[in-house]
Image: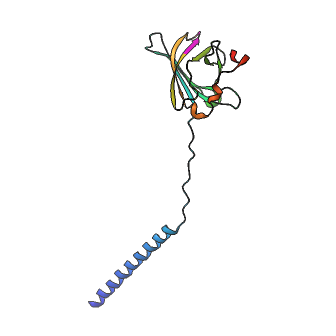
Amino acid sequence: MPVIHTRRSVLLLSAGAAAVLLAGIAIARFVHEPTAPPQKIAAQSPAPTLNCVFYDLTHANIVVSFDFAVAFPDGAPPRFDLRSQATRDGNQIFNAGERPVWTYAFDDDGAPTVTSPDGAIRIVLFALEPSARGVAFVDAGLRSNEFRNLDGKCRQSDFGDSGHASAFRVPTGDAAQK
């Protein structure tokens, strides 16, 4: 019997030594393997947007809403790309390459406006805050034969974060006329 006990002990010792050796190799490999440094993710400001909602005369129901992506071409006024338009009759959603571009200008009273490509719809933005960071709400008026003159609100977001607040400045001279 002592021979069997010795063989079993040797086998157990060998198995234990092998386990310790494998664990040591795994730990040494884990510790000494070079790792890539963590990559920094560049913080980007969200893209500026303008979302406008216009109500019926009682302000009980939404008549129409517009959702714009705002772009700032170099040396040009801001550009408002219509992403979607929603009415009681349904929604229109425009793909990136098909978005109607609305123009930014000032009306005869000097108020900032955004006008549809065909000129049929004009949104007047009262107290626009181009340097506002984050979200700001602006009173707005809709001028249109289709929707009539309606009051509403626009939610401008991330205009100030875009670094292009100067693009909204009131033009001088002949350029101030629209």
Q: Main secondary structure of the magenta part?
A: strand
- Please tell me how many numbered marks the rendered image carries: 0
At x 32%, y 84%, the residue is: 9
Q: Please state the horizontal and vertical placement of residue 49, each as a whole percent of the image.
A: 56, 29
Of all residues, the one furthest to the left in this rendering is: 1
Quadrant of the frame with the C terminus: top right
Q: How is the image coloured?
A: rainbow
Q: Please state the horizontal and vertical placement of residue 141, each as a whole percent of the image.
A: 55, 14
Horizontal side, residue 91 vs residue 169: left or right: left
Of all residues, the one furthest to the right in this rendering is: 174
At x 55%, y 58%, the residue is: 37
Q: Is residue 97 above or below residue 112?
A: below
Q: Quadrant of residue 23?
A: bottom left
Q: Is residue 75 visible?
A: yes
Of all residues, the one furthest to the bottom in this rendering is: 2
Horizontal side, residue 117 vs residue 83: left or right: right
Quadrant of the frame with the N terminus: bottom left
Horizontal side, residue 153 vs residue 82: left or right: left
- In this rendered view, identify the residue nearer to me: 120 or 150: 150
- In this rendered view, identify the residue nearer to me: 83 or 128: 128
Q: Quadrant of residue 131?
A: top right
Q: Is residue 78 visible?
A: no
Q: Please state the horizontal and vertical placement of residue 105, each as a whole percent of the image.
A: 65, 19
At x 56%, y 38%, the residue is: 45
Whether the magenta-drawn stretch holds residue 174 is answered as no
Q: Please state the horizontal and vertical placement of residue 177, each as a whole percent of the image.
A: 69, 15
- In this rendered view, identify the residue nearer to me: 70 or 23: 70
Q: Which residues are magenta?
A: 141-145
